[in-house]
Image (tube, helix red, strand yellow):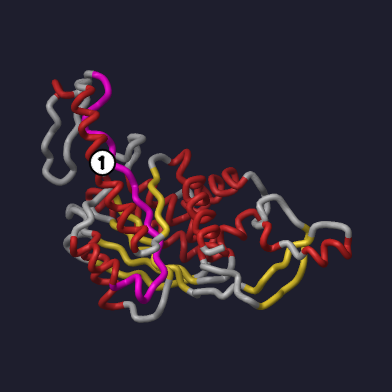
Amino acid sequence: MPSLITQVKSKLFITSARRSMHPLDGAYASLMRGRGSDFEDLREYQVGDQVRDIDWRASARHNEILVKRMRADRMHTVMFVVDTGSTMAALAENEEPKYELALLAAGALGYLTISHGDDIGLVYGDGAAVKRRASGRTESALEGTLRTIQSETRATTAPGSINKLLAYVAATISRRMILVVITDEAPMTDRTDQLIRRLRVQHDMLWVTVTDANPVLAEQSQAARSDVVTGWEVPEFVHGDNSLRAAVIAEEEREENERRAMFEKYAISHVTIRDTAHAIGDILRMLDRRDRARS
């Protein structure tokens, strides 16, 4: 069985355009929310380093640009909170199963975490049940986490429930962690707002939204298009209806704006991913914005 981590690493390093971990160190530091105040050493400046990390006095003495490396204040555990309901087995915007994008997001952020010696954990489930996987800090632990997300999403028949997942975390996790929530375009209700507000007091949070495919195809087609929960099929005659497609897109944009407003209110880093080709780059850019926001 092919390793899921190998697939993630290939996309991660291709996107970073480097073969070493150095270009991803900044992303990791941003994920961990800070480098700390303890000086570690100096090294030569490399493309991608933050200007604020340059030691100008040392650079002048050595006649080369040197960057200060600080010992990171690590949060120890990144807890992935992943919707594995049947709705995540539906198609994403690029016609791939949404759980494939969820795997890529969890794999990339999980690999950054374990590569620097920190733990990853997993809370997963649907509207019927929520479970928790033991934490670990090895590639084997990450592979097991990704396999669990994949198998649970394929096997479940219950729709997702992000509120049930968040309520589980609020009730069972007392130690401060970084929560990485991965779900689809589920509506943000008053209950969602209440749970996020409660969790944000205790934890640092990141939110990854996986987009849904437009149920109305751009051209007339006899291809089957059905709801994974109810089984209701989209009538063939609506495909190719540009006005109907535009209405669906407008509603998605309205919901996206509501999500963005909620995340901004609680200072939660957020990214929307639409396809496997751009997901890693979008996630790294989100971490870069997160880094600059605390500058």
| Residue at the farthest bottom position | 174
Instruction: Provide residue 209's location: percent of width, then percent of height.
Output: 34, 50
Residue drawn at the location 42% of the way across and 73% of the way down: 177
Q: Is residue 200 part of the magenta span, yes or no?
A: yes
Number of residues whose C-alpha sits closer than 10 Å to that of mark 1, classed few (under 14), some (14–19) or many (20 or more): some
Q: Residue at x 80, y 57 (%)?
A: 65
Element on which disc 1 rests: helix
* Residue at the spot 22% in from the left edge and 20% down from the top edge: 240
The image position of residue 92, as x and y in percent, is 32, 40
Q: Residue furthest top?
A: 220
Given residues 293 and 78, the one toward you in this image is: 293
Report the magenta residues as a range.
198-219
> Percent from the top left, x then y, of residue 9?
55, 51
Residue 112 lies in quadrant: bottom right
Residue 210 vertical placement versus 192 (above, below): above
State the residue in front, 103 or 29. Answer: 29
Q: Would you name the residue on which mark 1 appears?
A: 252
Q: Left of 139 or right of it: where is 205?
A: left
Q: Is residue 73 magenta?
A: no
Q: Is residue 256 left or right of residue 5?
A: left
Q: Quadrant of residue 204?
A: bottom left
- 206 sits to left or right of 280: left
Q: Quadrant of residue 145?
A: bottom left
Amino acid type at circle 1 is Glu
Asked whether 17 or 272 is in front, the reply is 272
